Amino acid sequence: MSVTVVAPPVVALVGNPNCGKTALFNALTGSRQKVANYPGVTIEKKVGPLTTPAGRSIQVVDLPGTYSLRARSPDEEITRDVVLGRLKSEVVPDLIVCVGDASNLRLALRLALELKRVGRPVMLSLNMMDIARKRGISIDVERLSRELGVPVVESVAVRRGGIDALLAGIDKRLDEQLKSGEADWQPPDAGALRVGQREADRLLAAAVRGPGERDSLTARVDSVLLHPVIGLLILLAILFVMFQAVFAWAAPAMDGIEAAFHWLGDQVQGAPLPDLLKSFLKDGLIGGVGAVIVFLPQIVILFFFILVLEDLGYMARAAFLMDRIMGGAGLHGRAFIPLLSSFACAIPGIMSTRVIDNRRDRLTTILVAPLMTCSARIPVYTLIIGAFIPDREVWGFVGLQGLVMFGLYSTGIVGALTVSFVLKRLIWRDTPGEPFMLELPDYKMPRAKSLAIGLWARATAFLKRAGTTIASMMILIWFLASFPQAPEGATDPAISYSLAAMIGSAIQPLTAPLGFNWQINVALIPGMAAREVAVGSLGTIYSIAGGEEATEQIGRALVASWSLGTALALLAWYVFAPQCASTLAVIRRETGGWRWMWITFAYMLALAYVAALATYQIARALGAG
């Protein structure tokens, strides 16, 4: 006897960017959502389960934001193809919920008309109704539903009870579909989807009343934040505070994590275990992985700032402010948000370049995004800055360590703008620029639940990375640093006879002009898997070479082994080096081949070598080598 398993209905959320669609998805699915990629591309897919008030289990899919089914960017192409059933790996949605910003419905209504012509069940959710009412906008929901020809409900995703009408509407629409039976559906051709803005404007005039003026508080704030001079100074101040906070706020939590791993190492040291096993557990796993996890508070703080700025609506303002500067360097104004996202991680930054319509503008942004100082560099920067830069204030109120960190981030930004300028002037100089058009959303207070979900997702992703990629690399480094063991009668430290020392010494002729020793060489190689591995590698190598004191104070071990010039050269190397295999893989997938991946790897490696060489030689000339 065979059992037929019925898949739950699929409800797709479709809407313009900044319509509150993601907040609505979070309200519907909570923390049960799963994030993956569509097959063959690195465009993110969010799916979450939902049990409706009628007890029906459904799957909610949050599709990428789009203004029209006449797709112009890769993000919009995915939304169009899912809605039209062109992706064989995806189920055609049983119900499409068009999410519209109730305070700005003009473009949303045109999208709703296009979705209606698809021929699948559709309903319109007027989201952010609280903001619309505050601005004096009145919407005749029944009239709009009648004129549009689909059910229309109100919703406020961020308030308790704000999605009740939507949930009831979903149940009712699915019930109607079930009663009517599954009819054969054929997706329409592209021409049948075309809707003129005039038809949407007619609906707007028929059902929407009110001033429709921009929020007065938003207008007053924007008069300051969008000022061509004051606005840029405020943006720089925000970024400066963010980098200062990465050091200042994270210190207590970092001390606690460090103490926990130190205690764990002591327990292993005192356990009745063979010396080789003790070394593996203490120096390889605890010392290596712990040297990376200790930087989790700093990474969480960086993500916190980015998520808050996104939720506030400030990111779009920052892109507007930077348009003139970025345009002069050959970057499209829309490139600012992908580049700023790359401060957290270049992978989502590169993926978010899909909002850029022109392929060459998108490609330029992809090529320079890895130059943004991602969170994976933080452990390296923090380790070296903490060891070699004094913890004191300059000008009476600015931390010197945070100032150096800000300088490293600034160097990455200048490097990205310079590379973009060269690409546009030498390679794509005949490509005409496109005007930068951007819709500025109203300011909104960040919601604690959304921030918590975002921070939890990123923290767990980092810990998963530490427990897989980084841990495996630490085991490899421990093995290379421990075998073969020193021969009898050896006078040098045992690690000097290891495979790690042999490999590092073989590379030495190439890196000696940079001031790098063999220990640094060994750390750079597995660092290709993930930049954070370099810190764990150094922790393992110096722990094995220097004993317990080096494990407790790896910074002191570096100061004893390196000159200031070497430390500065390594910082310069990490500003530019392509030290992340995952990023290179995403570049290959986003550009559709190997060519641009290898070009990125080659030019970044060349920049890193030249920058480290110049830094070390200048430091030597100044007596710091």
Image: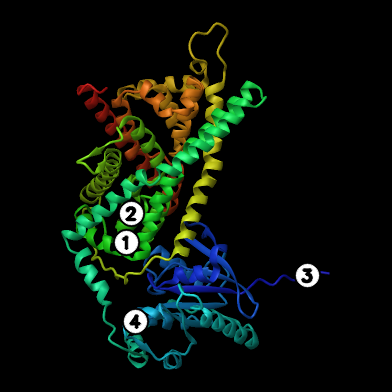
Kind of residue at badge 2: Leu
Separation (CA) of disc 2 from disc 1: 9 Å
Mark 3 = which residue? 3
Q: In the rendering, at what x and y percent does residue 74 appear?
A: 41, 63
Whether pointer 2 and pointer 1 mark residues with C-beta atoms closer than 8 Å, the reply is: yes
Q: Is residue 470 left or right of residue 519?
A: right
Can residue 239 be seen here? The reply is: yes
Q: Earlier in the sequence, mark 1 or mark 4?
A: 4
Whether pointer 1 and pointer 3 mark residues with C-beta atoms closer than 8 Å, the reply is: no
Q: Residue at x 36, y 30 (%)?
A: 387
As helix, strand or loop, the secondary structure at mark 4 comes to helix
The picture quadrant where one finds residue 433 is bottom left
Whether pointer 3 and pointer 4 mark residues with C-beta atoms closer than 8 Å, the reply is: no
Q: State the mark number for residue 315.
A: 1
As helix, strand or loop, the secondary structure at mark 3 comes to loop
Q: Residue at x 56, y 36 (%)?
A: 472
Q: In the rendering, at what x and y percent does residue 21 appear?
A: 44, 71
Q: State the mark number for residue 134.
A: 4
Q: Earlier in the sequence, mark 3 or mark 2?
A: 3
Crowding at dot 1, Cα within 10 Å, few <14 / some 14-19 / many 20+, comes out as many
Separation (CA) of disc 4 from disc 2: 32 Å
Closer to us: 408 or 67: 408
Can residue 105 be seen here? The reply is: no
Crowding at dot 2, Cα within 10 Å, few <14 / some 14-19 / many 20+, comes out as many
Q: Which one is in front in this view, the residue at disc 3 or the one at disc 4?
A: 4
Separation (CA) of disc 1 from disc 4: 23 Å
Image quarter of the N terminus: bottom right
Q: Earlier in the sequence, mark 2 or mark 1?
A: 1
Q: Is residue 96 left or right of residue 322?
A: right
Closer to us: 25 or 42: 25
